[in-house]
Image (cartoon, rainbow, N blue to C red):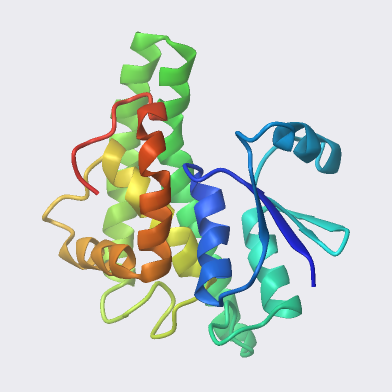
Amino acid sequence: MSLTLYSHPFSSYCQKVLMALWENEIAFTYRHLEEPGASEALGRLWPLGRFPVLVDDGVTVAESSIIIEHLDLRHPGPVRWLPDDRDAALEVRFMDRFFDNHVMTEMQKPVAEALRGEAGRKDEALVEAARTLDIAYGWLEARLTGRSWAAGEDFSLADCAAAPSLFYADWVRQIGPQFPVLRAYRSRLLARPSFARAVEEARPYRHYFPLGAPDRD
């Protein structure tokens, strides 16, 4: 087995995949994208240039959810990322997409405007992100009630998506006290050793966050 991951510690989607690798103690070569030549190698493997990208014995696998499903198929471990039951698997996939599309994507909009350097557009995006994230938080508050993890009682692909999504979203729109179930879930994710490791390895790069990283995890 030869696995290579092209990744950056501060990337939410990279953290998602790193959690899956670390949870099952899968050996891999880490190509940090700030290392010389790593970005160029990534570009040759995946012309879109987005990351993470996994190379498994010469096979290139892109997109974080697909990478984790690939690991579940080709390198299974004690933590299963998708259940065998198709209905249960559908719920895991749905929650994975919810966190990526309705939490992380919304959180990234004001970040993108801040990187462009247009203050007015950034402020508008922050207002809109607060509105849409509050809607997502409210939906999650109800959906997660009675659950230990995102899709039920088993840690899954959905939780790998949830951890960085909620971590960074809270920096843009803090998860308020009116969402106690969601706040408790985020705390459980932060206590998970795989995500705690991802947070620590990303800490030196917090100055990259264009809105200013808060003094909290």
What is the quadrant of residue 67 in the picture? bottom right
> Is 192 placed above or below 127 here?
below
Residue farthest to the bottom, as pictured: 85
Q: Nearer the viewer, residue 110 or 213?
A: 213
Q: Position of residue 177 (x, y in %)?
A: 11, 55
In the image, residue 10 lies at what x, y percent?
47, 42
Rendering coords of residue 210 (x, y %):
38, 24
Residue at the image position 49 percent from the left and 68 percent from the top: 158
Image spot of residue 74 (x, y percent): 76, 77
Total numbered labels: 0
Which residue corresponds to the image point at 50% horizontal and 74% vertical from the top-left? 23
Residue, far front: 36
Residue 95 appears anywhere in the view: no
Residue at screen point 22% across, 50% down? 175
Residue 83 falls in which quadrant of the image?
bottom right
- Quick one: 95 or 194, which is closer to the camera? 194
Dividing the picture into quadrants, the one containing residue 38 is top right
In the rendered view, tell whether residue 75 sits above or below residue 170.
Answer: below
For the N terminus, which image quadrant?
A: bottom right
